[in-house]
Image (cartoon, rainbow, N blue to C red):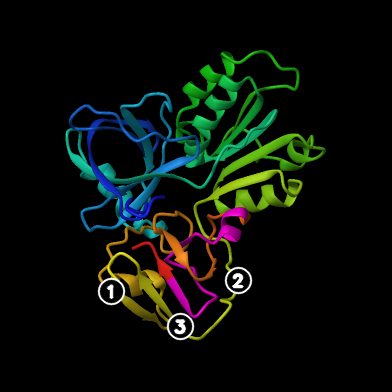
Amino acid sequence: MTATSAPPSTRRTALRVASKDAVADGIVALTLVDPAGGRLPDWTPGSHIDLVLPTGEGRQYSLCGDRWDARTYRVAVRREEPQLGGRGGSSWVHDVLAVGDLVEVGGPRNHFHLHPAEDYLFIAGGIGITPLLPMVEAARRLGARWRLVCAGRTRASMPFLDELAELADSTAEQDDGERLVVVARDERERLDLEPLLGGLDARTRVYACGPAPLLDAVARHCPPGQLRTERFSAAEPPAPVRDAPFTVVLQRSGAQVEVARDVSVLEAVRSAGAAVLSSCREGTCGTCETGVLAGVPDHRDSVLDEAERERGDCMLLCVSRSRSDRLVLDL
């Protein structure tokens, strides 16, 4: 990031909804394009964008289209009912947002990178297939070995099964069984991870996305260092390193604000006039990621990996705090 570029948390652009299609029970796919027909910012498998709601809040959705199509983004949105924790974003997408509408978009960003490997095992729970679909396509293009397990309530609730079957059919033969396995709870027993992950080759990299119970179970069975996950809900964070207030400096405006123990950094910088996009407010989506120019952040999120935490050059403002008396942010 350069000193003059906008940080990911504030970068937005308006895109037009080119299509809106039902792709599974309770799930619609949106195709977004530049209103002027221009190219869109490049992205890599595992990336996501933020759809900005009329309230100004953002909602994070993984890019699940063709990574080589420079003029369209595709995301899939599952309706989240309020009584099950939905906060209104998916209802707005399903019930209000229409083909032809303009919608503000933040990103793309990627906290779920696909690293080079000879062999991949992908595990998706329901809508968790969305970040994995471009990864499967990338693995196929690279000639790597891959297997994908999709789990869900029913086949009708799992999006993109036809596309995944085509990817499996178009991949060269491999001798370790089915490339695509669909586990629908109304058809088969629950996913048995022990035989799937037991005795895993050390060269295999496992990528999993889905509900927390599934990811926790995968983590219990997967050898350390071979697993990357993307969570829908936050892991239990450690206690803050310090209870004392600290000072945050907004480098671009020169404003300073003290962050009390019961106030998040996100709330504090907004009170100082910084326009920071946010979504989950629990450290899982990465929407409020902001550059750190000086000071030592106390990372309490479920997004950054160990290398990113050690670099200390960014933080998630909604949950993370400071180890030092002073933080200087790229805002």
Query: Quick one: label 1 or label 3, which is nearer the N terminus?
Result: 3
Q: Nearer the viewer, residue 112 or 18?
A: 112
Q: Nearer the viewer, residue 225 or 77?
A: 225
Decide: is 293 above or below 186: below
Residues packed near mark 3 inside 10 Å, few (<14), some (14 to 19) or many (20 plus)? some
Q: Is residue 26 left or right of residue 321?
A: left
Query: Quick one: label 2 or label 1, which is nearer the N terminus?
Result: 2
| Count of residue discs | 3
Specify whether residue 308 is painted magenta.
Answer: yes
User: Badge 2 is on which residue?
Assistant: 238
Query: Residue 214: percent from the left, percent from the top?
Result: 61, 48
Q: Which mark is residue 272?
A: 1
Look at label 1 and name its amino acid: Ala
Query: Residue 68: percent from the left, percent from the top?
Result: 42, 24
Q: Verify CB contact (< 8 Å) between mark 1 and mark 3.
A: no
Specify whether residue 305 is painted magenta.
Answer: no
Q: CA distance from mark 1 to mark 3?
A: 17 Å
Look at label 2 and name its amino acid: Pro
The residue drawn where x is 45% and y is 84% is 245
Q: CA distance from mark 2 to mark 3?
A: 15 Å
Query: Residue 308: percent from the left, percent from the top?
Result: 57, 55
Start and end of the magenta stretch?
A: 307-327
Query: Residue 81: percent from the left, percent from the top?
Result: 36, 53
Look at label 3 and name its amino acid: Arg
